[in-house]
Image (cartoon, rainbow, N blue to C red):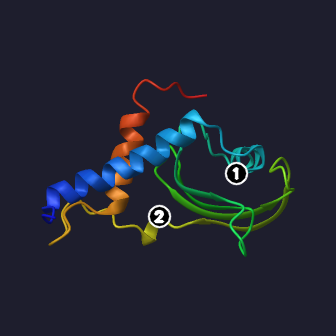
Amino acid sequence: MRQQNVQQQNLSSKEAIRRSAMYWRQHSPPKALLDYAASQGVDCGRAIFLRLDIDFPGMPRLFGTLLTPEEKFISFEIDTDKNHVSVELVEEWRDVTSEQNLSLSNSGIGVGYGALAVQVLREMNVGVSQE
């Protein structure tokens, strides 16, 4: 198998981000997560979920990373009831934006993951109304 060049790798990474984001736009995330995010001022209708794991053994019931419409990366770990309707404990809700690679040009890797995620967020929010 031929190795991808930097541009192909960036395109592949961007498509993976888009697939995850589109999935969670088409399949509503758990109510407990949506409610908690809203209580923190996050419009989930315009945010994208970069990662959302549900009921992974040994972890809180919901954990992952989202990118807010304001382009803040939030890492979260939330325990909920078994149906994911109500929050029982928020173990983490932390802005991790400063930990992201937001560079548009990195030697050997091209565009950073964070910058690709921001591009996807902006593209997906074209024409999406603000609440």
The residue identified by callout 1 is 40
Q: Relative to 12, is 45 on the left or the right?
A: right
Q: Position of residue 70 (x, y in %)?
A: 49, 47
Q: Say if 119 sits above or below 52 in the image.
A: above
Camera-side residue of 125 and 59: 59
Q: Position of residue 57 (x, y in %)?
A: 71, 71
Identity, as a three-letter code, of the amino acid under mark 2: Thr
Identity, as a three-letter code, of the amino acid under mark 1: Gln
Camera-side residue of 65 and 100: 65
Q: Say if 69 sits above or below 76 in the image.
A: above
The residue identified by callout 2 is 97
Q: Relative to 107, is 117 on the left or the right?
A: right
Which quarter shows the C terminus?
top right
Q: Position of residue 72 (x, y in %)?
A: 50, 55
Q: How much space separates mark 2 and mark 1, taking CA atoms? A: 16 Å
Q: Residues within 10 Å of mark 1 (few under 14, many from 20)?
A: few
Q: Residues within 10 Å of mark 2 (few under 14, many from 20)?
A: some
To which quarter of the image does residue 59 belong? bottom right
Which quarter shows the N terminus?
bottom left
**CB of mark 2 within 8 Å of CB of mark 1?**
no
In the rendered image, the residue lying farthest to the front is: 1
Residue at 12% x, 64% y is 2
Camera-side residue of 38 and 6: 6
Q: Earlier in the sequence, mark 2 or mark 1?
A: 1
Residue at 48% x, 48% y is 20
